[in-house]
Amino acid sequence: GAVVSQHPSRVICKSGTSVKIECRSLDFQATTMFWYRQFPKQSLMLMATSNEGSKATYEQGVEKDKFLINHASLTLSTLTVTSAHPEDSSFYICSARGLAGNGNLETQYFGPGTRLLVL
Amino acid sequence: RKEVEQDPGPFNVPEGATVAFNCTYSNSASQSFFWYRQDCRKEPKLLMSVYSSGNEDGRFTAQLNRASQYISLLIRDSKLSDSATYLCVVNGGAGSYQLTFGKGTKLSVIP
């Protein structure tokens, strides 16, 4: 099946620092990548949608200047949490959509997620 | 009203039991429906898509009722490995690839 990787898998940082998370589609070209956040016992919440080569579209309530998304190629998207604070601690998951495996463009393949803890 | 609503459970069932999960969604424009499973502290993984005519994949059967905006998942002959949280997922409408997730229903299959 299609593989999406994320790096790092977990990160602990001090308040005020910036953290970059990478999301890669390893065996297919991702037309669109999505970034989600999941707090404990909550559902995945979509943060933003990014298409290769264009600006990301952010969901209501998500600060675009705080969560910088770059989707420079069809296989790589990055999310940078700038000036992270303890309330940003969460499980960040990316997904990629593209022609892979079953050839169904509706299928999103998820990365393994990144656990961020801001002290 | 929550966009995708599920009973959070937990459902604790013995091995071999049949268990059913239900889900309701509020967006009548949704066109695509899925069940994902999420293991503890892991990413969601697609279990199956849900089609209007209902579909089956081994021990798993999914049903969709568009009129009632209701989706179900039936698991027969439960295995210990079925223990996970099951997420009901719908898309945002025709041509939309954005997904909306329910909070999930937790299933524990006990020996």
Image (tube, coloured by chain):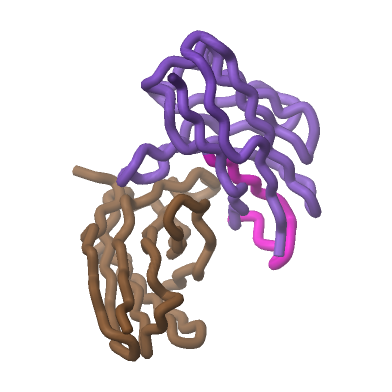
Chain colours: A purple, B brown
Is the N terminus of chain A in the top left, top right, bottom left or bottom right quadrant? bottom right
- Residue A69, quarter of picture: top right
> Residue B110 versus residue A81: which sits nearer the camera?
B110
Is the C terminus of chain A in the top left, top right, bottom left or bottom right quadrant? top left
- Residue drawn at x 59%, y 50% is A110
Query: Which x, y percent locates residue B48?
Result: 50, 70
Query: Which x, y percent locates residue B92?
Result: 44, 46
Image: A46 above or below B64: above
> Residue B18 versus residue A117: which sits nearer the camera?
A117
- Residue drawn at x 50%, y 87% is B58
- Residue drawn at x 66%, y 61% is A104
Is A35 one of the magenta-colored residues?
no
Is A104 one of the magenta-colored residues?
yes
> Residue B65 versus residue B87: which sits nearer the camera?
B87
- Residue drawn at x 22%, y 63% is B9
Image: A9 above or below A47: below
Query: Which x, y percent locates residue B16?
Result: 34, 90
Say whether residue B33 is left or right of residue B5.
right
Image: B55 above or below A11: below
Say whether residue A59 is left or right of residue B108.
right
Q: Which residues are magenta?
A: A93-106
Task: Give the total number of marks visible in the rendering.
Answer: 0
